Image (tube, rainbow, N blue to C red):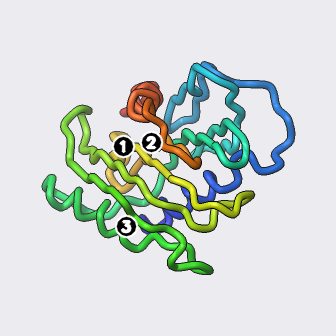
């Protein structure tokens, strides 16, 4: 999988969240494990599994017009040796992310991309706020708030893991940073 596809895939998960998915029991607080990751579903609220495979786990909550998505997706991560090179990989990937049918769909309002040493392997913090002019199920533009962490997987340096938490709604979520941090800290990437 190419890096550029990861943000688009992640946004696609967010687009289908809350849109006619069959009713499922809440998985809030449950632990999900694959050979490549351990992920705990967010604890508060009604969360359901949106998708699950060896390389992707996504949870969704809310309804059309006010959705939350928490996900971990593995992807092929290009070469980088310095913090600036890691930041550039994320910046370049985010810049290429557009909806091919509607290239003007998202209006970027805020973005932060910063290398971090918070884990024992290279990671970049990603935060962005965009205006989604074509959100499904509503005619009004909505805010899309994204808070995440991109990391090189400690098991395989050619693999990256993106841990993302987002909110899409008419208003911004003042508690998004705290919710995102709780989810991101629940993710473990095994070394072997």
The span from disc 3 to disc 2 (Cα, nearest Å) is: 15 Å
Instruction: Quickly name the residue at label 1.
Output: 149
What residue is drawn where x is 81% and y is 45%?
Answer: 21
Using the numbered discs, state the Cα–Cα distance from disc 1 to disc 3 in whole angstroms: 14 Å
CA neighbours of label 1 inside 10 A, class few (<14), some (14 to 19), many (20+):
many
Q: Is residue 187 visible?
A: no
Residue under the image location 62 percent in, 67 percent down: 134
Identify which residue is drawn at 27% across, 52% down: 112
- Tag 3, which secondary structure? helix
- Based on the displayed image, in which of its 4 quarters is residue 154 positioned? top left
Quadrant position of residue 63: top right
Residues marked 1 and 2 touching at CB (< 8 Å) = yes
Q: Position of residue 140 (x, y in %)?
A: 64, 61
Q: Position of residue 1 (x, y in %)?
A: 50, 65
Res. 163 mark = 2
Q: CA distance from mark 1 to mark 2?
A: 5 Å
In this rendering, would 114 be left or right of 76?
A: left
């Amino acid at each position: 999988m190419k890096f550029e596809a990861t943000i688009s895939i992640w946004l696609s998960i967010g687009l289908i969240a809350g849109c006619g998915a069959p009713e499922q029991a809440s998985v809030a607080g449950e632990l999900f494990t694959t050979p490549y990751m351990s992920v705990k579903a967010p604890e508060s609220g009604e969360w359901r599994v949106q998708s699950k495979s060896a390389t992707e786990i996504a949870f969704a909550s809310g309804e059309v017009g006010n959705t939350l998505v928490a996900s971990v997706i593995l992807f092929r991560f290009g070469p980088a040796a310095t913090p600036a090179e890691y930041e550039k990989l994320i910046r370049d990937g985010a810049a290429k992310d557009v909806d091919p049918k509607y290239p003007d769909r998202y209006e970027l309002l805020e973005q932060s991309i910063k290398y971090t040493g918070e884990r024992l392997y290279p990671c970049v913090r990603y935060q962005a706020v965009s205006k989604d002019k074509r959100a499904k199920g509503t005619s009004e533009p909505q805010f899309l708030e994204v808070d995440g962490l991109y990391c090189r997987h400690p098991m395989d340096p050619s693999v990256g893991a993106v841990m993302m938490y987002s909110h899409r709604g008419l208003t911004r979520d003042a508690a998004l940073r705290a919710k995102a941090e709780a989810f991101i800290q629940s993710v473990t990437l095994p070394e072997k």
